[in-house]
Amino acid sequence: MAPRVSWTGVFPAVTTQFRDDLSLDIDATARVMEGLIRDGVSGLIVCGSVGENTSLTRPEKVAVMEAAKAVAAGRVPVLCGIAEFTTAFAVETAREAARVGIDGIMVMPALVYSAKPHETAAHFRTVATATDLPVMLYNNPPIYKNDVTPDILVSLADVETVVCFKDSSGDTRRFIDTRNQVGDRFVLFAGLDDVVVESVAMGAVGWVSGMSNAFPREGETLFRLAAAGRFAEAMPLYEWFMPLLHLDARPDLVQCIKLCEHLMGRGSALTRPPRLALTGSERAEVEAMVAKAVATRPALPEVGLKAAA
């Protein structure tokens, strides 16, 4: 029987924090996680794209996992991204996640290699069958150049540990195409910030969010409004949020999100090379977006979030 999961709501793709010398700052990373949980997010994804997975050594990834498990302390589910160059490396990292006691893994296609569909399916199948952890499959063809189509997903329906699909293609029709073929076999998650309301309308029950790192209460509120069908209330918040949400679709999304997080007093903007800091007009543009967002920050409708700390 497939592992049962109750994943729903906003799961920020948590940033990994670095010191000025670019060494891992695990204490600062833990503070970021605690702040997100305090502000009402429903789960955490560590070592994802925004968490700079491919810029971390395996011991660093394990340290981030251990910190997340300790900080969450069972309050919210914690998933770890698995982003590796080979299937064997992905299996090894998945087994480390199981050893640490993470609640699940988010598996990306094998990186660098532009795989054929059957190769992508084989990669996912091998990783998922090597672990008892529940698995979220992650599709982000603009970034990872391998498209996890509904047909690939359907071919993995027999793998019991594969329980969830996160789509960042921007094509929300895929949620319907998948459901038409396999019903509710998979939990569906939105993966691209600027189509989250559309994704929820098409059946997504969760959102792996980038910009909710900087504005977690707004992200969780927006998601809950959409999930409840309260679209008249959701739309003003969505319109306010949209300029920032578009940053999640840029190639330099990590730098943009970490800069926003820094401007909101929630973390550092430092990224590891080859990612370099935004400068000049690009930085000024993001700073202006955040300043405008703060100046026009809307009152949030009641959705059951605890009062802000």
Image (spheres, helix red, strand yellow):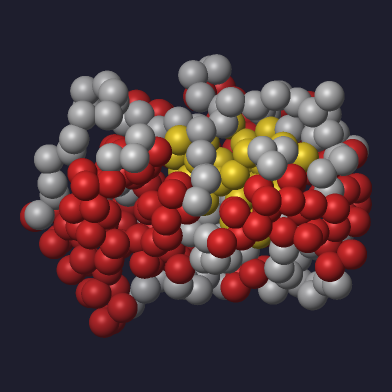
Give above or below for 26 relative to 132: below
Residue nearest the viewer, comparing 172 with 265: 172
Image quarter of the C terminus: top left
Give above or below for 3 relative to 18: above
276 left or right of 127?
left
Q: Residue furthest bottom?
A: 281
Q: Image quadrant of residue 188?
A: top right
Do we see residue 107 in this rendering? no
Do we see residue 37 in this rendering? yes
Give above or below for 230 relative to 196: above
Identify the residue at horizontal 50%, vertical 40% (top origin): 206
User: How many numbered tags mark residues here?
Assistant: 0
4 left or right of 227?
right
Give the percent coordinates (x, y) of residue 227: 40, 38
Give the percent coordinates (x, y) of residue 157: 82, 44
Give above or below for 62 relative to 40: below
Identify the residue at horizontal 44%, vertical 49% (top origin): 201
122 left or right of 267?
right
Identify the residue at horizontal 8%, vertical 55% (top origin): 295
140 left or right of 245?
right
Image quarter of the N terminus: top right
Identify the residue at horizontal 50%, vertical 51% (top origin): 202
Give the percent coordinates (x, y) of residue 209: 45, 49
Residue nearest the viewer, comparing 195 with 173: 173
